[in-house]
Each structure stands twice: as C-alpha cells, then as structure tokens.
Image (spheres, rainbow, N blue to C red):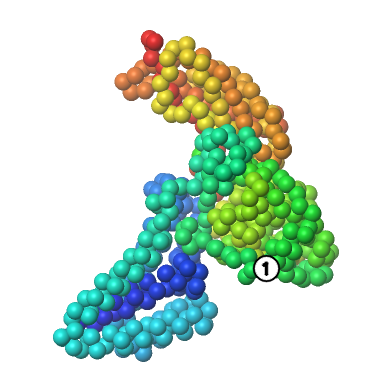
Amino acid sequence: MIPVLLIGFIASVALSAVGLLARLANLAPFPAEKLYNWATYQLGVPAMFQLVHKIFGFGEGGKIFAFVGVLFAWVGGLTLLGLAPPLIGGLVVAVVSLLFVNPIWALVYGLLYIGLRFALSPVQTDPNRRGVLNTLSLASLGLFGAGVAGALRPLFTGPVGKTNVTTAAANSSKTPLLEGLTSQDDFYYVSINNEALDPRIAENNWKLEVDGLVKTPQKFALADLKTFKPVDLELTMCCISNPVGGDLIGNAIWTGLKFKDLMDKVGVQPGAKWVTWEAEDGFYESIALRDALEQDVMLAYSMNGEALNFKHGFPLRVIVPGRFGMKQPRWLTKITFTSDEKPGYWANRGWSKTAFIAPLSRIDYPTRGLVFKPGEVVKARGIAAAGNKQITKVEVSTNGGDSWLEATLQPKRSKWAWTQWTLDWKAEAGTADLGEIKSGRQFIVRCYADGVVQGSEERDSLPEAASGLHRLTVSVPNKA
C-alpha cells in the first residue's frame, strides 16, 4: 500500500502546479497568491519592512522569498489532506479557496483536487504500478518547479531601476533620450507582488470605471481616453522606501490627460471631497479632491514617447506631482469620488498618508572606493529633488563636512523634474580613515529646497521616507 500522504503530496503538487502555471499565463486566479497577498498586507507594517530590507535589500528578494514560503506552506497543507477521503479533501480545498477566489474558481479547484485523488486511487492500491506513481511524482514536481522558476525569474533577469547615471547615453531605449531622462528599462520598479505575478492587461479587455459622487458614471476604453487633449509632463518619481543615495528614483516625460478634464467629463457632484484610485493588482490610494485640482495631476498612458509597458502600469497609471510613488497607482481600473477619505493600501498599515517627497540629493560620480591621482580633475555629478519645492542650491563637501563647495546646477525643462548638478574638483590627499590607507576624501552632498538646507538627521526609509546626507569615500594617495 502506498502511503496516503505520498498520494496527498502528488495531488497537492499537481494542483498547485496547474494553478500557478495558469496564473502566470493569466488564465485563472491562484489561491496561494491571494494567501500571499493577505499575509504580506497583514505583516506590511513599517517595522517588518525595515527588517526585510535589512536582510534582502530593496529588490525583489524579500518578496520572492515570502511568496515561495507561502507556496510551500500551501503545498504542505494540501498534502495533509491525503489523510482524508477524496470528497472531504475536495470540499476543504473548495472552502479554503473560497476565502481567496470567487465561488466558481473555488469549485474548480475543489473538483480538480477530487479528480486527482480518484485518478491516483488505482495506483495507490496496486503494488505493480509503483512506476506510474514515480512518474507522476516526477511530472508533478517538474510542473511545480516550472511554476516556481517563473516566480523566481526576477532574481535571474537582474533588477529594474538602475538610475545611478543620469545621462541619456546610459539609457537603453532604442531612441536616444533627452539628457536626464530615465528609460522604461532603467526606471525603478517596486510592487506589492513579485514581478512574475503583476498584471498583464490586454487593452481590449480593459476599461476605466469612474463612479461615486459624479453626475454621469462612465467606463472609458483606452481609445476613449486618448480623445482627450493630450498633455506632457516631465516628472521625477521616487519610492518612499528609497534609502539615502538609493536607486529607487527616476525621471521621465509622461503623456496622458489631465485628471481635471476627466472630472469635467463625468461631472463631479458638490459633496465630493476625496478621490480613490483602484488598481488591477488590488492596490488602492486616495487623495483630497482639492489637491487633485491644484496640481498637475494626470492619467498617463505613455512614458518617454512609448506606451507604458506592463511593469510601469499599462494601460494607465496615475501621476501626482510632489508625492512618492505609493500615491500613484499603476494598472488603474477604477476611480471613485466620495465625501469621506478612504486611507490607502499602505497608509492603513502605518505608512505615510500624505507621502510628500522630502528634499534629497545623491552623488552619482565618483563612486565609492575609486582611487584618484593627486592633482587629477574629477567631475563630480549627481541629482537632487524636492517634490513640490524647487532646488535652489547644491553643495558638496570633499573633506567630510569641514567645508562646502557650491555645485553648478543644470537647467531644467520642468519644475517637477530632478535637478542635475556637477562640480569640478582637483583631487588632493585627505585624512579619511580607509583602513590601511590613511589618505582619502569623504564626499558629502546636500541640497537646498526653496532656500532651506536639506536635513542631515539620519532616519530609516519607513514610514515617512529616509532622511540624511549621501556620503562616500574615495582614495587619493599622498604621492602620484
């Protein structure tokens, strides 16, 4: 007799493999993904995120580790159902799935589990068919492995969002970009899911629903939205979890329609005070209606002259100048006007409600650890940004803050774009402690926003964004 738990394991792996592959192909929802979303949301308080970032950094690693952990817990739970009769096991699968997917898909998963268990029953009772069991085990594990590999794909394709260099030559778009723009390929990417599970929306299946306190609730196809007068806006976007000197920031020209034009179309009622955005991935955020009217808020369908790709929100995303990316959902599906505030997805877990970008600055060159000859001219460069405030000055210290040099600010095309700065420095030996090398220079950068100097107090990224000055050390030997 084949152990019942082995039969339960094969059925659970096969069911999970089919569900995961169907989800990766956008054919069906996967209960384990919904379980993962629920768990990460419940644990998504700032303190937990700070711990995850310390262990895994700011890439996909933490999310992938969590998803794989949930996946294996799901398989383990289903394996224990091998102790129950097939019909009872199928009922449990359906009921549990009902917590995360709609009733039809919950029933499908339950019936599929029952079918797998009955299909394996003859193998279980026939000792001469052990080879079939082994084959099924390997096939199930192979399918499951293929699905896990799909979820792990971001680990092997490299991170998105390397914006350390701010020149057009560093961008990877086929068409050369203007100086200071970040291509879609290089623009930072952060999501509540892991990359493999983010929405991939087909344009012909998508419409934007607008309802709530409006005179004419409507649904708009992408073609409908493109009939509005198009507007371009060069804007720097930054993630609230970006560390001091981090890469989770980029600058692009966004094309779309003014949010106010859409409001005029549907006719907002006098009692409306708040706007809630809802996205395909389950994310939602809100903003006061007065802020949506006072700023250059827009709905974007293009980035640097190209249609948004799926990572950056195709077919439509929100642009709210001066705010961190968490206030600007991608994959927008619904807009609701209400009289009361609905706090956002992360605001409900203790993160910032307003998410205004605080003044920040970064050194892009030189990079940490470089060695320069005495007398060598170094052209330092970097960026500074301050959300809805304007950068009025950038200063760089080459001696650990003992004195400061004023950098040259490059002209900007938009008040919402980051400011690029440069500074020519003649390398000279210093006293920075570099271990065995006792000659070096510590670079520090700080900016002024509307005349006020950037704060130097160090603070973690969450929940209100990182604070502190970006600094690094380079080596300058005493002799050439």
Left or right for 427, reference 85: right
Within 10 angstroms of label 1, few (less than 14), some, or many (20 or more) residues?
Answer: many
> In the rendered image, which residue does mark 1 sit on?
207
The quadrant in which residue 260 appears is bottom right
Mark 1, secondary structure of its residue: loop
Judge by depth and name the residue closer to the eye, 107 or 175.
175
Q: Residue furthest top?
A: 479
Q: Position of residue 457 (x, y in %)?
A: 54, 34
Regarding residue 359, the answer to whether it shows in the image is no
Image location of residue 188, percent across then percent down: 53, 46
Where does residue 440 sit, x and y in percent of width and height? 42, 19
Q: Position of residue 392 (x, y in %)?
A: 69, 28
Q: Quadrant of the C terminus?
A: top left
- Taking the image as drawn, is residue 373 in sight? yes
Front position in the image: 35 or 256: 256
- Looking at the image, is 220 positioned above or below residue 133? above
Q: Residue at x 60, y 57 (%)?
A: 313
Please tell me which residue is depicted at 37% across the width and 76% down the height of the picture. Answer: 15
Relative placement, left or right, of 257 versus 461 is right
In the image, farthest residue toward the left: 128
